[in-house]
Image (cartoon, rainbow, N blue to C red):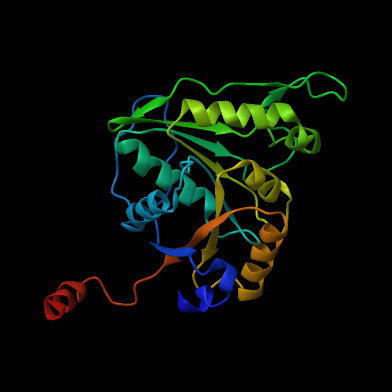
């Protein structure tokens, strides 16, 4: 972890790095009520750090994205959303991680037509809270118009008021402009890196790109951390530490 953290300069000295161990396979979201499932403890730590970072304006709209791709940003957003919802909160997860044609979150896509953005469906109960997963209005072929439209900013503001948390899963920062543009409309961004895979230079370039755009960087998630100690030995080591 320290190798990644050392790449952050003095302007980011307060940025937190959260470690998330190798996750369980991601199940599909059914239409009926969901049951909470065990999640890595790192998500609870991330929630507490985000609460501590909040100042006068609560951190409710948070964007997650990797640097070059394959870091597991979608997994992090889904599992963190599940943690928040199962604790009694109303959470919206916006899937903007796979831009391209054929995905629709907006109506009136022809140039010059008024942009009409679809509101999220009814939430799905999860634990004592609610979880809603939708496709981003920007995940479509004419995203240039959507991302720069005042209607999109207003749509995101409405979701911020309607939900306790709005989590955006964006495409990789270094491959698409979506994450940087949506990051400017969010309360802050969290960079997702993969343990033993993400290049340090990629993390530095992603950080510099966000800073140039005046995007608030909240921290870094070190995803898919593997414990080198075999499971059978961990209880004995815990005993020795005590």
| 9 relative to 73, above or below | below
Residue beneath the point at 51% across and 79% down: 3
Q: Quadrant of the image for the C terminus?
A: bottom left
Residue at the image position 73 percent from the left and 40 percent from the top: 100
Taking the spot 37% from the left edge, 53% from the top edge, the residue there is 43
Residue 231's image quarter? bottom left
Q: Furthest residue to the front?
A: 56
Q: Position of residue 18 (x, y in %)?
A: 42, 62
| Nearest to the observer: residue 17 or residue 174 | 17
Q: Can residue 136 be seen in this snapshot?
A: yes
| Closer to the camera in the image, 200 or 16 | 16
| Residue located 38% across and 53% down the image | 52
- Side of 30 where 4 appears, left or right: right
Tell whether 52 sits left or right of 238.
Answer: right
Q: Is residue 170 above or below residue 114?
A: below
Determine the image quadrant of residue 193.
Answer: bottom right
Rendering coords of residue 201 (x, y %): 66, 74
Q: Is residue 8 visible?
A: no
State the residue in front, 183 or 66.
183
Q: Quadrant of the N terminus?
A: bottom left
Image height of 222 relative to 127, above or below: below
Lateral position of residue 148 relative to residue 78, left or right: right
- Image coords of residue 24 (percent x, y): 37, 53
Q: Is residue 120 depicted above or below 76 in this figure? A: above
């Amino acid at each position: 972890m320290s190798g990644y953290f050392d790449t952050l300069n003095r302007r980011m000295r307060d940025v937190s790095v959260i470690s998330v161990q190798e996750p369980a396979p991601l199940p599909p979201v059914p239409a009926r009520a969901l049951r909470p499932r065990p999640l890595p403890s790192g998500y609870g730590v991330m929630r507490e750090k985000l609460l501590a970072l909040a100042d006068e304006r609560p951190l409710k709209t948070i964007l997650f994205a990797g640097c070059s791709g394959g870091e597991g940003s979608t997994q992090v957003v889904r599992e963190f959303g599940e943690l928040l919802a199962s604790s009694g909160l109303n959470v919206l997860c916006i899937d903007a991680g796979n831009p391209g044609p054929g995905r629709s979150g907006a109506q009136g896509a022809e140039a010059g037509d008024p942009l009409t953005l679809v509101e999220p469906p009814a939430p799905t109960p999860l634990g004592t809270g609610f979880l809603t997963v939708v496709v981003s209005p920007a995940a479509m072929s004419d995203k240039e118009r959507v991302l720069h439209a005042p209607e999109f900013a207003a749509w995101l503001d409405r979701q911020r008021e309607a939900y306790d948390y709005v989590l955006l899963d964006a495409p990789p920062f270094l491959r698409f402009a979506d994450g940087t543009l949506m990051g400017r409309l969010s309360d802050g961004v969290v960079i997702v890196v993969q343990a033993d895979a993400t290049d340090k230079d990629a993390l530095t370039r992603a950080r510099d790109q966000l800073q140039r755009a005046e995007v608030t960087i909240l921290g870094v998630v070190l995803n898919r951390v593997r414990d080198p100690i075999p499971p059978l030995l961990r209880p004995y080591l815990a005993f020795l530490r005590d």
